[in-house]
């Protein structure tokens, strides 16, 4: 998953650099955002034993 | 002063790219030279830094091409803010994991703070910065220097340096993750080499 996210980030950077269509950049950007949230949810498996 | 503002904003956004390129570069240096392998949450914070900075890179590239409009500028600032907010969430989770008295934290400290605490500070700075740029937007649409001028080339070098640091991370993660689907909670070596 990390490999996919980083290669997507690199692809977005290249697409921006080369002036790719806006819809393509935005779609990939939000896709990466969702993958990152999914990965975060995967790693966060328990609530913290803290009380404020 | 009003005429200088668009140029000033252009260079401030370049400075933002330089700052995050340096931060990610230092974390890579700590990883390769200091032997501090990043945990999954550390990596997620790196991704958020890149995701947020992509907004800045896009603004600069569009300004250089002369296609930057108000609506695109504000939308790209929004992307950067969203990326920084997500990063702040990741960093605060890691801070909370190590907040109890007696906990030594994950990895070494730099100037008294662990890297995830510094990451949280940088995300807050980016959110503040993009908010200020948004407030100033009606008076300061970034304006790039003339094509092929010294300033134009310098700005391109900054963007390419950022691209290079993303590429280095992309290669590094292949070695770190190997054939696994996700990173282990406490990585002890580069999985591609069988650790």
Image (cartoon, coloured by chain):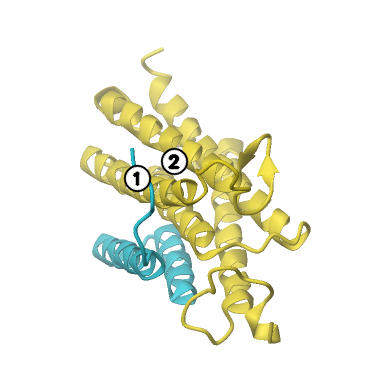
- Structural distance between the alpha carbons of marks 1 and 2: 7 Å
Q: Write down which chain is painted yellow.
A: B
**Rendering colour (chain A):** cyan
Give me the residue at 67% from left, 77% from top. B190
Q: Residues within 10 Å of mark 1 (few under 14, many from 20)?
A: some
In the image, B183 versus B100, the foreground residue is B100
A50 left or right of B158 in image:
left
Nearer to us in this view, B15 or B93? B93
Say which residue appears at 52% left-offset and 61% top-offset: B43
Q: Residue most toward the top?
A: B1
Residue at 48%, 54% in the rendered image? B45
Q: Quadrant of the C terminus of chain B?
A: bottom right
User: Is residue B155 among the parts visible in the rendering?
Assistant: no
Q: Is residue A6 above or below residue B135?
A: below
State which quadrant residue B179 falls in: bottom right
Query: Vertically, is B46 above or below B18?
Result: below
The residue lying toward the viewer, choosing from A35 and B195, is B195
Contact (Cβ within 8 Å) of mark 1 with mark 2: yes
Q: Position of residue B88 (x, y in %)?
A: 40, 45
Identify the residue position indicated by label 2 in the image. Answer: B123
Q: Is residue B111 left or right of residue A37?
A: right
Secondary structure type for disc 1: helix
Q: Where's residue B121, x and y in %?
A: 49, 36
Q: Residue furthest right?
A: B33
């Amino acid at each position: 998953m990390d490999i996919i996210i980083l290669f997507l980030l690199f692809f977005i950077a290249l697409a921006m650099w080369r002036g790719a269509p806006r819809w393509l950049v935005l779609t990939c950007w939000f896709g990466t955002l969702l993958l990152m949230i999914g990965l975060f949810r995967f790693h966060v498996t328990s609530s913290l034993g803290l009380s404020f | 002063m009003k005429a200088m503002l668009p140029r000033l904003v252009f260079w401030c956004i370049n400075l933002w790219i330089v700052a995050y390129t340096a931060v990610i570069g230092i974390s890579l240096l700590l990883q390769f030279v200091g032997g501090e392998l990043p945990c999954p949450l550390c990596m997620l914070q790196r991704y958020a830094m890149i995701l947020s900075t992509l907004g800045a890179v896009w603004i600069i590239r569009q300004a250089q091409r002369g296609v930057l409009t108000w609506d695109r500028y504000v939308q790209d600032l929004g992307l950067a803010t969203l990326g920084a907010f997500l990063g702040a969430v990741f960093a605060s989770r890691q801070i909370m994991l190590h907040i109890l008295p007696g906990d030594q934290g994950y990895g070494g400290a730099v100037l008294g703070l662990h890297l995830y605490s510094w990451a949280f500070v940088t995300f807050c700075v980016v959110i503040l910065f993009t908010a200020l740029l948004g407030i100033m937007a009606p008076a300061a649409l970034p304006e790039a220097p003339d094509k092929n001028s010294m300033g134009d080339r310098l700005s391109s070098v900054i963007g390419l340096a950022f691209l290079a640091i993303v590429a280095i991370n992309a290669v590094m993660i292949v070695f770190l993750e190997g054939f696994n689907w996700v990173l282990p909670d406490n990585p002890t070596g580069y999985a591609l080499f069988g650790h």
